[in-house]
Amino acid sequence: MSHTYRRLKDLREDNNFTQTQIAEYLHVKQSTYSQYETGSRDISVNAIDKLSDFYNVSIEYILGRTNNPKMNR
């Protein structure tokens, strides 16, 4: 899941969002979201699913299982 943490940060920065904005979207504290990005805290499947919809990328992309961000829904 190590690719996940890097992808979370890259997606956020590429879309010009702050950690606080994404944390608010997920209904978590900014410090919790920061821990998701550093890998010091596991992110829930529900949160990954929400971020997949938010960024319009596949869950597999967030998880680092593919480099193709397109949704396959």
Image (spheres, rainbow, N blue to C red):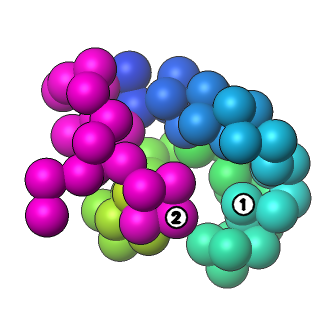
Residue farthest bottom in this picture: 27
Q: Is residue 63 magenta?
A: yes
For residue 63, above or below residue 25 = above
Q: Residue furthest left?
A: 72
Residue 65, image x, y percentages:
18, 26
Which residue is at a point 42% across and 56% down the rendered structure image? 56
Quick check: 7 left or right of 48?
right
Asked if the residues shown at circle 2 and circle 1 are in contact, with their CB atoms under 8 angstroms apart, the answer is: yes
Image quarter of residue 53: bottom left
Please state the horizontal and vertical placement of residue 6, each as a whole percent of the image.
53, 23
Q: Nearer the viewer, residue 19 or 44?
A: 19
Residue type at mark 1 is Ile
Q: Residues within 10 Å of mark 1 (few under 14, many from 20)?
A: some
- Of labels 2 and 1, the one closer to you: 2
Numbered disc 2: secondary structure: helix
The dominant secondary structure in magenta is: loop
x 68%, y 74%: residue: 25
Q: Is residue 58 above or below residue 37?
A: below
In-image side of 13 versus 49 (left or right)? right
Q: Which residue is disc 1 drawn over?
A: 22
**Residue range highlighted in magenta:** 53-73
Instruction: Look at the image and tell me whether residue 42 can be seen.
Output: yes
